[in-house]
Image (cartoon, rainbow, N blue to C red):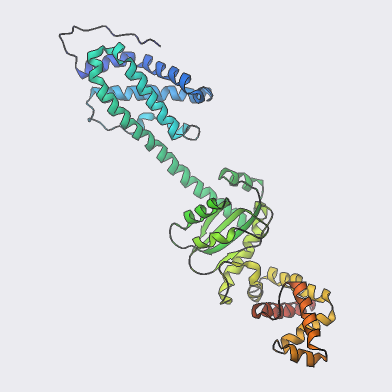
Amino acid sequence: MSIPASPASPASRPRTRAQIAQRLTRASGALSSAALSRMEKDMPWVVQLPAEDRSWIGLILQAGIKSFIDWFRHGEGAAPITAEVFGAAPRALAGDISLEQTVAMVRLSIVVVDENLDEVLGQADADAVRPALNKYAREIAFATAEVYARAAEQRGAWDARLEALVVDSLLRGEGDDTISSRASALGWDGSGHVVVMAGGLGEGSALEHVRRIAHDRKLDCLCAVQGDRLVVVLGGVDRTGQPAQRVADAFADGAVVIGPVVDSLTDARISADAALSALKVAHGWVDAPRPVHADDLLPERALAGDATARQALVEQVHRPLIAAGATVLETLETYLAQGASIEATARALFVHPNTVRYRLKHVVEATGLSPANARDSYVLRLALTVGRLTERGL
């Protein structure tokens, strides 16, 4: 695009900043139009933007050129260049145009202005303006970055509030389509299974530590702080909960509990209830691993009055033992009563020790718990008690 030249002044009379700025002002409209045309030619993505966004870009160019003219007129150090020269446009465009793209637009617009200075001002005055233009280009680039930094800060604060709201809603059991859409807005992919973890909050950077580990493991992640505890919802785990265990490193010292694996985000309440219930009583198992699965704390949860845990002990332990047969159940009860002695159990039941071993093997097959293991023995003993009480309606 050809830029109309301003009427020349006598060469013997040097122009002041104000006079040069006035000539630039007369050409500012043509300069911004030339810059926009160049962008549409050299930057194909600009043409693909909606018409409204392209109009914003035109306004940005006009504001930027006007700002340079005012800055040059009053002296380059008279007033600092701030992000406000952009008006509201960059905040509206920050979600559609990246910082890299915006800096590229600013750079190209400066190039276009520089290429047309000789035609607008004449070589002598153009040479006087170019140093100021180069300095302005650097300053405006910093101002552009400031706009995007502010937008990112505001967006980050909003995302944190939305994330806390989503996790709180999940803990209350509001796992509907609205929650799923809000989670999607936070980057939740929705593939794979879901698990909830709970533990101490730890240092101030715990949230970022959790997110970093989750990202490295290619897991979806939602975090929320509730008092002195941290609740983390992880998506993309397998049926065993792997690799959620890796996230435990981000929690404070002490117990970290992993809830049961569920199929989707809308079922996260089930995992969260178990994890939070187990976290309250985790200190009851002195040698508990870190992290510990909520189902491994069923005895402590049942003793604390968790009805879900009591029901799980009945369904996962007591009923399978009954189904295994009366002799298996009797052998187990006798074995526990005899202090886990094979020989004493055999004498009490008038059978061979190998028969006791055979029947106890059926206990492992039915429940996954070994009577010879101290912790498993404790779980079996409590499950038998709870089962008997449940049968009596207690």
Q: Position of residue 254 (x, y in %)?
A: 51, 69
> Is 331 left or right of 197, judged from the image as shown?
right
Q: Position of residue 122 (x, y in %)?
A: 26, 11
Q: Position of residue 160 (x, y in %)?
A: 50, 49
Q: Position of residue 26 (x, y in %)?
A: 31, 13
Q: Is residue 127 above or below residue 329?
A: above
> Is 283 left or right of 31, judged from the image as shown?
right
Point out the residue furthest to the front here: 354
Q: Is residue 303 above or below residue 135?
A: below
Total marks in image = 0
Q: Is residue 172 visible?
A: no
Q: What residue is at 31 percent from the left and 11 percent from the top?
A: 119
- Foreground pick, 352 / 228: 352
Q: Is residue 233 above or below residue 94?
A: below
Q: In the rendered image, which quarter contains the C terminus? A: bottom right
Q: What residue is at 47 percent from the left and 23 percent from the top?
A: 43
Res 70 → quadrant = top left
Q: Is residue 114 above or below residue 201?
A: above
- Foreground pick, 279 / 128: 128
- Foreground pick, 145 / 45: 45
Res 107 → quadrant = top left
Res 317 → quadrant = bottom right
- Foreground pick, 210 / 67: 210
Q: What residue is at 53 percent from the left and 52 percent from the top?
A: 216
Q: Is residue 51 visible?
A: yes
Q: In the rendered image, which quarter contains the N terminus? A: top left
Q: What residue is at 66 percent from the left and 49 percent from the top?
A: 176
